[in-house]
Image: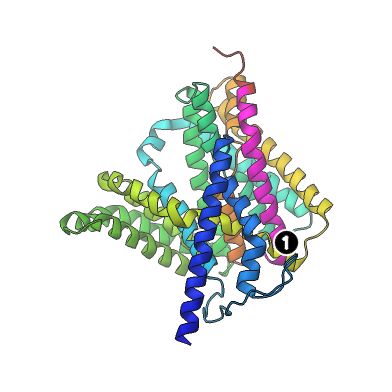
Amino acid sequence: MIKTEFEIIFNVLLLVAIALIFARIMGYLFYRLKQPAVIGEIIAGVILGGIVVAYFSGQEFFIFSFKLPLPNLNFYSNNPDPFYLLAQIGILFILFISGLETNISKMKRLGKASVSVAIGGVILPLVFGFILGVILGFSIQVSIIIGLILTATSVGVTVRTLMDIGELDSDVGTTILGSAVIDDVIGIVLLAFVLGAESMMGVATVGIRIAIFFFIFLYLGLKIIDKILDLGEKIHLPRAFLSISLAILLIYSFFSDRAGISGIIGAFIAGLLIGQNVRSKKIVEDIKSIGYGLFIPIFFVWIGVSLWEGYKTEYSSVMHIFFLFVVLLFVSIVGKIIGCGAGAKIAGMSNKESLQIGVGMIPRMELALVISTAAINHSILNGETGQEILLVTILIAISTTIITPFLIKATFKNED
């Protein structure tokens, strides 16, 4: 029995190594094409998908006419897929790093424009996505998740494009950066509410639980987190500060999950708290090295691998998925342009600046994928519906990432 378990462990380690190599190769290729490496990592997962499924199931798959002679993974009592466990740690690191890089003081200084744009960029896509989901026959919960997916903003590609044209430090660039942070925070809070509502009785109960959790772990955390982190300075051991920070990440994720909110919310709050500590700059690069070096690429590869679940659940017709993708893509673009543009206009910006901000807020990527996978993990998205929405989310993320630079350059054309 022990020998068999060790064989499984080393087989999994080999698979992780292959996944990392594929992820880095594909990520580099897309980086050379001036596209986010994340897209390459997802495609690496799609390429590896058939092999991974065969690897874990030990069954014939698609064009493969052989069965891989690998032991069954059933000795993992909670989940038979250890690759999945590594991917979930990747989600925690994404939100943890996001929290670390969220500057609360800067958010306060950005003022009226960023808040107004963020609110408009959340409300309109959320409402559009929800209404569209209901019209298409999805349940209320699934429709809310569709709306949340459309609210998430990933401005990495926007930042790079604004840097290329020298507009990153402009009023438009600064507003986009601040708004993206704020609307992600709003999206994370709304996600916590939805995931909590899935497992608890009544909206009021959900609100009370979230309020209690945020009070204990956010408000009180601000009071004592510095004292806890001081231990990292007093303990004269290599990377002690890093170890304590990682421990806080795991503890917050655990209690967030037990509160019925989802571990990723706890990871974000942990990052938010630690990020306000003056010593946090010492560990940010170490955290990124661990996250981006191992767990985060595995998460995006796992997303690509997950698409092969459609082979088991039998996707609906290609035309159905294509229709869903086109409609949601249109809504995602229009929702951001109108919502964020309206928010910018209310804040006193010109029509052209409002359009530029709306276009800059179009891209979706990490948080949209985190929301869809979190909904799958909490059984809000199930079976064929879950796989279809995950696939459409990936297509939207890739499409908005590719088209945004062209739209940004077009809106800034002929501007001195």
Picture quarter containing residue 143? bottom right
Alpha-carbon neighbours of circle 1 within 10 Å: few (<14), some, or many (≥20)? Answer: some
At mark 1, the secondary structure is helix
The three-letter amino acid code for the residue at tag 1 is: Thr
Q: Is residue 389 found inside the magenta-colored segment of the image? A: yes
Q: Quadrant of the C terminus?
A: top right
Picture quarter containing residue 101? top left
Where does the image place residue 48, in percent across and percent down from the top left? 62, 59
Residue 260 visible? The answer is no
Left or right: residue 322 versus residue 166 is right
Where does the image place residue 188, in percent across and percent down from the top left? 51, 51
> Depth check: 263 or 183 in front?
263
> Depth check: 305 or 19 in front?
19
Say which residue label 1 marks: 385
Report the span colored magenta: 380-409
**x 49%, y 60%: residue:** 17
Give the colour scheme of this rendering: rainbow
Left or right: residue 198 versus residue 287 is right
Figure check: 148 above or below 156 = below
**What count of labels does the image hold?**
1
Figure check: 135 above or below 253 = above
Q: Is residue 156 found inside the magenta-colored segment of the image? A: no
> Depth check: 18 or 350 in front?
18
Where does the image place residue 224, in percent across and percent down from the top left? 26, 56
**x 59%, y 20%: residue:** 412
